[in-house]
Every structure is written in C-alpha cells, then in structure tokens.
Amino acid sequence: MPILHNLRVTLEMIKWEHSIFALPFALCGAMLAAGGVPAWHQLAWIIVAMISARSAAMAFNRVADAAIDAANPRTQTRALPAGILTPSFVTTFVVVSCAVFVLAASRLNHLTLILSPLALGIVLLYSYTKRFTRWSHLVLGFALGIAPAAAWIAVRASLDPRILLLTAAVTFWVGGFDVLYACQDFDFDREAGLHSLPRYFGIRAALVISRLFHVIMLLLLITLVITFGLGKFAIAGVVAVAVLLAYEHSLVSSHDLSKLNAAFFTMNGVISVVFFVFIAADLLVR
C-alpha cells in the first residue's frame, strides 16, 4: 500500500531509531523524580511523548529544509528533495505526531498538557535557527534538553530546579556533537549563507568549542550527582561518559572527518544509554 510505503520511508528519513539519543535522559529525569521506577502508565506515556515529539521535530525539519537539502550535495538524495515523498505527506505525518504528543501529555497530568504547545514550539522552531544564528547548535541541544525536565513534570506534576542541571547537561552534550556534525557542511553553509560555529570559526576552532561544550556537560553531570546525593554507580556513569566522549573526539580531526558518522550516531547513542543504566542502577540499589 502506498501509505504504508510512504510511512516506512518517512521513518527511515527521520531515523526513527535514533530516538534513543534523548530518551534515556528523559528516563533519567523520570526515575530521579520517582526516586526509582515511575508508575508503568507514566513510563509508557513518557516514551510515547518522547518518540512522537522527536518524530514531529525531525519530519518538520525535513520539510523546513527541503530547499536547502536539495541544494546541498550531501543531502540531495533525502526523500523530499529526491521526490520520493511529497511535502503534504510529511506535513500530515508532523500533524499526526504532534497530536499523539498532545494525547500523551494529556494522559500524564494537567501541567504536561498545558505545557505541551510550548514544548512543541521549542522542538519545531529549532529548524529555522540556522538561518539567523550561529548558536543554533545549542538551540537544538535545548530542544532535546527539555526532555528530562518534561519527564520530571510528567511524574511529579511540578518542576524541581535541580533537574534543570540535567537539562543544561543535555543541551551542551547535543550542542557539542551537533557542532561536530556541522563540520561536514562547512563549505556549503558558507556558500548558502547559513549559520553555524564551523562556518564562523573554522573547523579546527569548532572542534575545540565542541570539546569545551562536552567538558561543561561533564561538570554539570558532576553537579547533578552531588545535588541529588547520588552514589558510586552515578559517579561511575559520569566517568564512563567522559571516557566515551574522549573516544568520540578522537575519531575526528580538522584533517579527517571520515569517521564523523560513527562519532555522531553510534557513540552518542551509546553515551545516553550508558548514563541511564548507571543512574538507574544507582537509584535501584539504594
């Protein structure tokens, strides 16, 4: 059936499986809020909300950037510029994903429902920031960084300022690896008038900024561990993240970006899962 085929292509286009990037940090927020495992219905709706929000954001980004992707040799084969999908189909997918997100928010509590339009605005409007600010990397980071705070609200129906440490950590983590990813579009961004840190500062300096962002992330994670009074497993989790980030940065240099996809996709998926496992273990063995 054409609809099922288009849906499959859409899921491939938005790399649906990469929902794993932010989901473990959202689950960390939920477990910190609950002091362990949240109620199963809360956990289920948090997962639905996370996946639907990310799906909406990624699909919206493809629609917003369709003309840019068509002009960029690296992205010309994506489904929209290649004509495999129509903008109307992908736009419908965005609307449905947003509706699922709002439904999930309504099943959690009243505050999550009230805040759901704000959350959608943040994750969708990121797509336009590269048109006017070089700091779009941190805007993307914040779009994912609100996940642990949102999960806290989903469990507690209130916001504790302490969880904003994890929001800030995820913001700088994502911002750091998005700077790495943007290095491969250095020439195109300059020609197209798009904004990014690599375009303004050069690839070598951008790699330094990326490392700085990740150092800030680690400092925020250490502060999170101290603030919540977490134990040895959580400390080990921060150490593991530091080692993985060091390895990620060893894969790329200003002279060799050939392993960038491995650094971007594989390592960051591992980092988020590893941190969640250690935080979960710390909370469960108390």
Image (cartoon, rainbow, N blue to C red):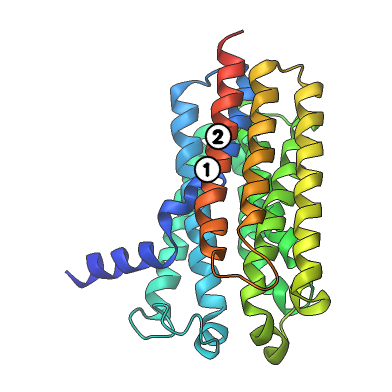
Q: Which residue is mark 2?
A: 274
Which element is circle 2 on?
helix
Residue 136 percent across, percent down from the top left = 74, 67
Amino acid carrying mark 2 in the image: Val
Disc 1 to disc 2, C-alpha distance:
6 Å
Give the quarter of the image for residue 26: top right
Which element is circle 1 on?
helix
Tell me, yes or no, whether the two marked residues, 1 and 2, touch with CB atoms within 8 Å. yes
In the picture shown, does residue 52 fall above or below 95?
A: above
* Side (left or right) of 27 relative to 94: right
- Mark 2 packing: few (<14 Cα in 10 Å), some, or many (20+)? some
Counting labels gives 2
Q: Which residue is mark 1?
A: 270
Q: Is residue 196 visible?
A: no
Residue name at image x 60 percent, y 58 percent: 251
Residue name at image x 66 percent, y 64 percent: 180
Amino acid carrying mark 1 in the image: Val
Residue 88 percent across, percent down from the top left = 40, 78
Q: Is residue 60 visible?
A: yes
Between residue 271 and residue 247, name the one nearer to us.
Answer: 247
